[in-house]
Image (spheres, rainbow, N blue to C red):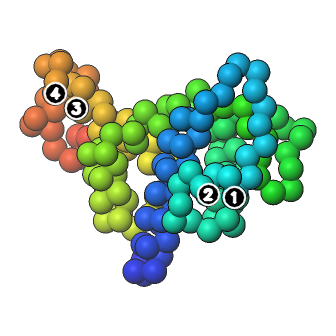
C-alpha cells in the first residue's frame, strides 16, 4: 500500500522534474555554450524547492540522459550544462501541455507510483490520442472513441 506521504513525495518528484526541464529549456544558450549551473542559480528560476532537491534532480536528469553535460568535467555541486538532449526534448513534449500534465499526475497518483519511462510513455499516449482526435485519423489500430482500457493497455 502506498502511503499518503509517499504519494506526496512522488507528486513533488514529478513537479521538480517537469519544472526543471521547462526552465532549463528556456535558458538562453548559444551553440557551444557549456555553463556551470549551481542549484542556487537554478533555484532562483523555479523556487519552492530546496538547494539539495534541485541538485539531486539535476543530477538525476543528467544520468537519465535528458541533459547534455560533458562527462569528464562534472563539479561536485551542480552540473556543467550544454543543453537538452533529444531524449530530454521528447520528455518535455510529452509533459508540456498543462491538461496532459494534470491527467498524468492524477493517473500516477491513482496508480501509486511511476517511473520516468512510464511518465514519458503515458504522456506520449495522451498526446497521441489528442492528435488522433483532432486530425480525425486512427493512430492506434482501433477506434480511439470506442477503445476499451484493455485495448489501450495492450498497445502499451
Quadrant of the image containing the C terminus: top left
- Give the Cα distance between marks 3 and 2: 33 Å
Query: Compared with residue 7, is residue 92 higher up or lower down, i.e. above or below?
Result: above
Query: Is residue 153 visible in the rendered structure shown here?
Result: no
Quadrant of the image containing the N terminus: bottom left
The front one of 75 and 9 is 75
Q: Which residue is mark 4?
A: 133
Query: Compared with residue 38, is residue 30 higher up or lower down, i.e. above or below?
Result: above
The front one of 147 and 94 is 94
Q: Mark 4 or mark 1: which is in front? A: 1
Count of numbered badges drawn on the protein: 4
Residue 151, image x, y percentages: 23, 40
The local secondary structure at tag 3 comes to helix
Quarter holding residue 108: bottom left
Pointers 3 and 4 in contact (C-beta within 8 Å):
yes
Query: Is residue 94 visible in the rendered structure shown here?
Result: yes
Q: Which residue is mark 1?
A: 40
Q: Which residue is mark 2?
A: 43
Residue 134, image x, y percentages: 16, 24
Q: Which residue is mark 3?
A: 130
Residue at left 82%, top 34%?
A: 70
Residue 60, image x, y percentages: 67, 52
Q: Residue furthest right?
A: 72
Residue at left 66%, top 28%?
A: 29
Of labels 2 and 4, earlier in sequence is 2
Of labels 3 and 2, earlier in sequence is 2
- Give the Cα distance between marks 1 and 3: 38 Å
Pointers 2 and 1 in contact (C-beta within 8 Å):
yes
Amino acid at each position: 500500500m502506498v502511503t499518503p506521504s509517499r504519494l506526496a513525495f512522488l507528486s513533488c518528484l514529478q513537479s521538480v522534474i517537469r519544472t526543471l526541464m521547462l526552465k532549463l529549456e528556456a535558458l538562453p544558450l548559444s551553440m557551444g555554450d557549456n555553463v556551470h549551473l549551481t542549484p542556487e542559480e537554478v533555484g532562483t528560476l523555479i523556487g519552492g524547492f530546496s538547494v539539495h532537491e534541485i541538485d539531486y534532480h539535476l543530477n538525476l536528469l543528467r544520468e537519465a540522459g535528458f541533459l547534455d553535460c560533458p562527462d569528464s568535467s562534472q563539479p561536485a555541486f551542480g552540473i556543467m550544462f550544454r543543453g537538452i538532449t533529444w531524449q530530454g526534448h521528447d520528455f518535455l513534449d510529452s509533459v508540456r501541455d498543462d491538461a496532459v500534465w494534470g491527467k498524468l499526475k492524477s493517473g500516477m497518483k491513482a496508480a501509486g507510483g511511476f517511473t520516468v519511462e512510464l511518465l514519458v510513455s503515458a504522456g506520449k499516449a495522451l498526446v497521441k490520442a489528442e492528435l488522433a482526435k483532432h486530425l480525425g485519423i486512427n493512430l492506434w489500430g482501433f477506434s480511439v472513441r470506442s477503445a476499451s482500457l484493455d485495448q489501450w493497455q495492450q498497445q502499451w
